[in-house]
Image (cartoon, helix red, strand yellow):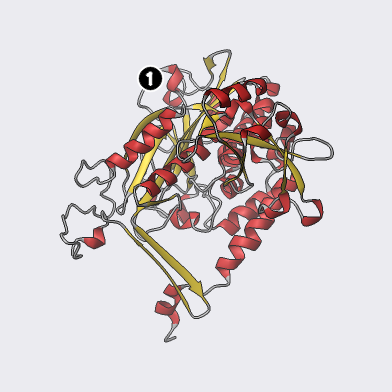
Amino acid sequence: MEAGEIQKFMADNDVQVVDLKFTDLLGTWQHFSTTPREISEEAFTEGLGFDGSSIRAFQGIERSDMVLLPDPNTALIDPFATRKTLHLIANIHEPITGNRYPKDPRGVAERAEAHLIKTGLADLSYWGPECEFFILDDVRYDYEQDRAYFYLDSVEAAWNTGREEGPNLAYKTDHKEGYFPAPPRDTLQDIRTEMMLTMESIGIDVEVHHHEVATAGQCEIDLRYDSLLSMADKVVWYKYIVRNVARQAGKTATFMPKPIFEDNGSGMHVHQSLWKDGVPLFYDPEGYAGTSEMARHYIGGIIKHGPALMALCAPTTNSYKRLVPGYEAPTTLVYSARNRSAAIRIPMYSNSPKSKRLEFRSPDPTANPYLTFSALLMAGLDGIKNKIDPGAPVDDVDLFDIDMAKSGYPQVPSSLAGSLDALESDHEFLLDGDVFNQDLIDTWIGYKRINEVDPVRIRPHPYEFQLYFDA
């Protein structure tokens, strides 16, 4: 839709409210609402102002004024608002120069797509994330000087087999036994269907939805692949829809990677491929698992830069409680055709050239999709540019069952602090073509260290009382 068509669209659809959304650096939607009268054609070129100093990791108070320019191509009717509301994703600009704000995550994704074309290597990248999440019935948590706890519950949870529920109808899900059970054990079929149909109603193509491995309502809804920027937009929509449909059903949803001890966490496996002139570039029938030399060099780039990538792909302290062997969260930076314990997998469901892709399995859904997809693309392009050898594939070894210290295989960092250190020392590949910039990277590292790593590091953990109270 063009800017000049928006007013007619609003009139034809009886729009009463316009909601402008933008993504902060960490990947969360922020928004404010206005009337259709304020969204004139000039609003798309002159923008609407907001206070950037009140958005985490954006501007200092001395440079707080910023401008949002709505993108007319993102116009959709919000499926949850009581009054007819037009939803527009906005791009962030500097008010004086009019330039794109360098730390606008959506701008990073746009520059990544432009950089890909400029390299001449490909003209299109496709992305297919698999976002997992938990749907819960009750969540409480608190941390004070004298106490700390979290409590979560689900009618499906394994620990509720003996609970008086008036009546307890059984069919609870055992730990690590939640993959694909049919109702009545899968109590969330209708809620996921509502999520899927809501996504479809606004143009997000869904491939499948199902229950996932963990107890307590772990779910997955897979999206049909799309280009980088479009898919990143769809992921933030996806999370918005999941949370709001869950709330309408009297439940809550979380994308926290590891909310439950000793069970699988939630990942975001990211499928990716490169194309040029309508031809898939990762396919070669003579190559390993049907992959081209370009695909293997792309994999080499991800392996080489894997530790630094994790600062964006697994960006929370909780992410590294998921990234432990034995819970289907790969920590070993190797590749394989079908080995799900490898961080990079080449799916073999089909021999079609169009389906040839790689899957990076270590990210999780707390990642900002604009930054994550862009960083993975830049790492892969660096691999192609420098012909980085990914090494031999690892096909016949369960990497969760071997001693990693003795294996010699490269590993992802074991903590967010370690990943931030890796990003600090290895980020030149992200600066190529000005896709990322130094200020964004420095801000990301500083914010994460000060606001996440240090607050978790300095607080006593409840389990430390089990370990050390009588020491």
- Residue 241 image position (x, y, % from top left): 44, 40
Query: Residue 379, relative to residue 59: is it above or below?
Result: above
In the image, residue 115 sits, relative to residue 329, either above or below, namely above
- Disc 1 secondary structure class: loop
Q: Which residue is mark 1?
A: 351
- Image check: 428 left or right of 144? right
Q: Residue at x 52, y 57 (%)?
A: 414
Provide residue 160's location: percent of width, then percent of height: 23, 61
Give left or right: position of 39 versus 125. right
Q: Amino acid at mark 1?
A: Asn
Badge 1 crowding class, 10 Å Cα cut-off, few under 14, some 14 to 19, many 20 or more, is few
Tell me if residue 442 comes above or below residue 467 in the rendering. above
Residue 338 can be seen, yes or no? no
Coordinates of residue 320 in the picture (x, y in percent):
49, 56
- In-image side of 280 versus 61 (left or right): left
* Residue in view at x 49 percent, y 54 percent: 319
Residue ID at (19%, 45%) = 184
Q: In this picture, is 144 found above or below 200?
A: below
Residue furthest to the bottom in view is 470
